[in-house]
Image (cartoon, grey):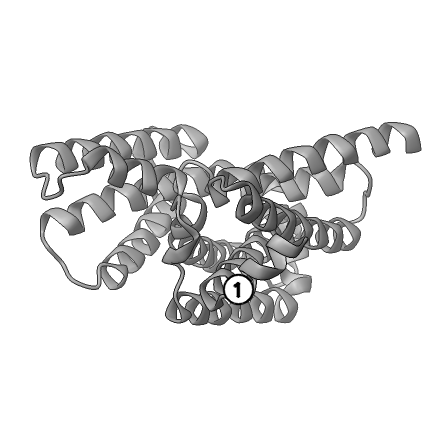
């Protein structure tokens, strides 16, 4: 505990803790709807797309690549959502095809046009998140805070519409709601969160932040509101526990946070069976 308190005296450590907690909260709120709509794979798919775009930005030597990566990832999310319904390859198959292609092309570009002496380190950091906690800055935390506030406002303001679209798109459309518009907004929000969270847990682990809290909550609760609240609490708790554990143990932040989510899922599964 004394060692942990010593680390927390440094601003960059506090930045990392705050950022991971905020991103986990956002991912958990979005993850409940994605899991219920059987569309949870989009988080993993978009993270792979973002990896390919980051590699392209590096090859083109684009400074401030976040302003290039984020809009292109949002555009890909829209295309996956809109095009997946009207093409020969649909749904999760379309996402899998695009994500694997983007991952492979991104790695190929980074190898062919490598500008770094530590290519394997750059790839590992992008895929699995930063291995050093000192990479977080005040600007990163501010961006996470703005994104989190936007997700919370979006979820609270449109809660009833999200609930309706999640469970019955046909009925919600008959009641005057436009499911496609809300699905489109959801895809854009997910793309933004995925790009920001990639700096914390990496492209291969981002889907865990989206899926695990929702699945954990569903092991115990049955109502949409209870699952949403429980998923948010579980995500924040796992993010906090995983980040603090990584500080003390010296392990990668992203992998440790995901490991804490796995433990949480097992505990909730056992609790659900006991509850019956």
Residue occupying the point 11% across, 47% down: 59
Q: Quadrant of the C terminus?
A: top right
Q: Which residue is mark 1?
A: 14
Categorize mark 1 by other alpha carbons within 10 Å: few (<14), some (14-19), many (20+).
Answer: some
Q: Is residue 131 visible?
A: yes
Residue occupying the point 56% across, 49% down: 243
Quick check: 171 above or below 124? below
Horizontal side, residue 68 vs residue 151: left or right: left
In the image, residue 93 lies at what x, y percent? Answer: 40, 28
Horizontal side, residue 146 vs residue 56: left or right: right
Q: Is residue 172 visible?
A: no
In the image, residue 265 lies at what x, y percent? Answer: 70, 34
Residue occupying the point 56% across, 57% down: 26
In the image, residue 113 lies at what x, y percent? Answer: 7, 39
User: Total marks drawn?
Assistant: 1
Horizontal side, residue 135 vs residue 146: left or right: left
């Amino acid at each position: 505990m004394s060692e942990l308190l010593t680390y927390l005296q440094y601003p960059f450590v506090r930045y990392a803790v705050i950022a991971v907690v905020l991103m986990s909260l956002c991912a958990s709120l979005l993850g409940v709807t994605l899991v219920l709509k059987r569309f949870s794979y989009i988080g993993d798919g978009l993270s792979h797309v973002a990896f390919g775009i980051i590699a392209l930005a590096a090859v083109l030597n684009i400074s401030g690549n976040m302003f290039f990566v984020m809009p292109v990832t949002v555009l890909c999310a829209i295309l996956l959502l809109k095009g997946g319904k009207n093409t020969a390859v649909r749904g999760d198959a379309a996402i899998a095809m695009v994500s694997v292609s983007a991952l492979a092309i991104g790695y190929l570009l980074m190898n062919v046009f490598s500008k770094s002496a530590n290519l394997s380190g750059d790839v590992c950091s992008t895929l699995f998140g930063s291995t050093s906690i000192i990479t977080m800055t005040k600007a990163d935390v501010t961006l996470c805070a703005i994104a989190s506030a936007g997700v919370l406002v979006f979820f609270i303001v449109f809660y009833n519409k999200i609930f309706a679209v999640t469970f019955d798109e046909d009925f919600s459309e008959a009641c005057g709601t436009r499911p496609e518009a809300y699905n489109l907004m959801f895809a854009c929000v997910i793309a933004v969160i995925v790009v920001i969270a990639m700096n914390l847990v990496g492209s291969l682990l981002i889907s865990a932040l989206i899926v695990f809290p929702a699945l954990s909550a569903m092991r115990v609760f049955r109502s949409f509101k209870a699952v949403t609240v429980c998923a948010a609490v579980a995500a924040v708790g796992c993010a906090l526990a995983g980040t603090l554990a990584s500080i003390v143990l010296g392990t990668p932040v992203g992998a440790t946070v995901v490991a804490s989510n796995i433990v949480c899922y097992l505990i909730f599964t056992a609790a659900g069976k006991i509850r019956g």
